[in-house]
Image (cartoon, rainbow, N blue to C red):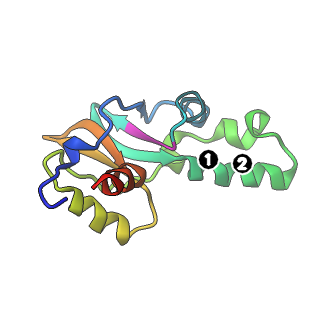
Amino acid sequence: MKNATISEIMSRQVQKLTTNDDVIDAKRIMDDHNINHVPIMRDGQLAGIISSNDIAQIEYLCDFIGEKLERSTIFRSLSIHEIMTKDVVSLSSSAKVSDAVLVFSNVSFHSLPVVDNGELVGIVTSKDVFRFLSLE
């Protein structure tokens, strides 16, 4: 593990949205691609990330007030910019897998966008790290 890099375990085909997209778009992408995190871009740069947990919190609120998520005025009125995590921790593709282990062991989130020279090149999740470590 000491010499393995993030580029060896990251997903390169990243679904992403922009700050102009709707939360409904994020939910649809997550459902269609069976993923839990979608990076959010603004002017070609990483601006944030939205997770299935972010959407689940909205869903909980909708359930509480007795509305179905997809038909909820709350859900339809929220923008991605309003609920995305803005201070995103990222790694470079040349970072070590051990760097990801260190980050994941100290935070409550489970994905890290991979950014090289300001460009989103991939995403690595705690599941990717666990899978890699289990093969060692």
| Tag 1 near tag 2, CB within 8 Å | yes
Q: On the rendered image, what quadrant is the C terminus found in?
A: bottom left
Label 2 CA crowd tier, 10 Å (few <14, some 14–19, many 20+): some
Residue 109: within the magenta? no
Residue 122 lies left or right of residue 57; in this view the side is left
| Residue drawn where x is 48% and y is 46% of the image | 50
Q: Which residues are magenta?
A: 36-40
Number of marks in picture: 2
Residue 4 lies left or right of residue 35; in this view the side is left
| Residue drawn where x is 22% and y is 62% of the image | 99
Question: What amino acid type should be assigned to the residue bearing mark 1?
Answer: Ile
Residue 9 lies left or right of residue 37; in this view the side is left
Magenta: predominant secondary structure element? Answer: strand
Relative to 71, residue 108 above or below: below
How far is the residue under mark 1 from the one under mark 2?
Answer: 6 Å
* Coordinates of residue 35 in the picture (x, y in percent): 51, 38
* Coordinates of residue 95 in the picture (x, y in percent): 16, 53
Q: Which residue is mark 1?
A: 55
Q: Which mark is residue 59?
A: 2
Nearer-the-camera pick, 38 or 102: 102
Q: On the rendered image, what quadrant is the N terminus found in?
A: bottom left
Question: What amino acid type should be assigned to the residue bearing mark 2?
Answer: Glu
* Coordinates of residue 20 in the picture (x, y in percent): 47, 31
Residue 130, picture quadrant:
bottom left
Residue 19, picture quadrant:
top left
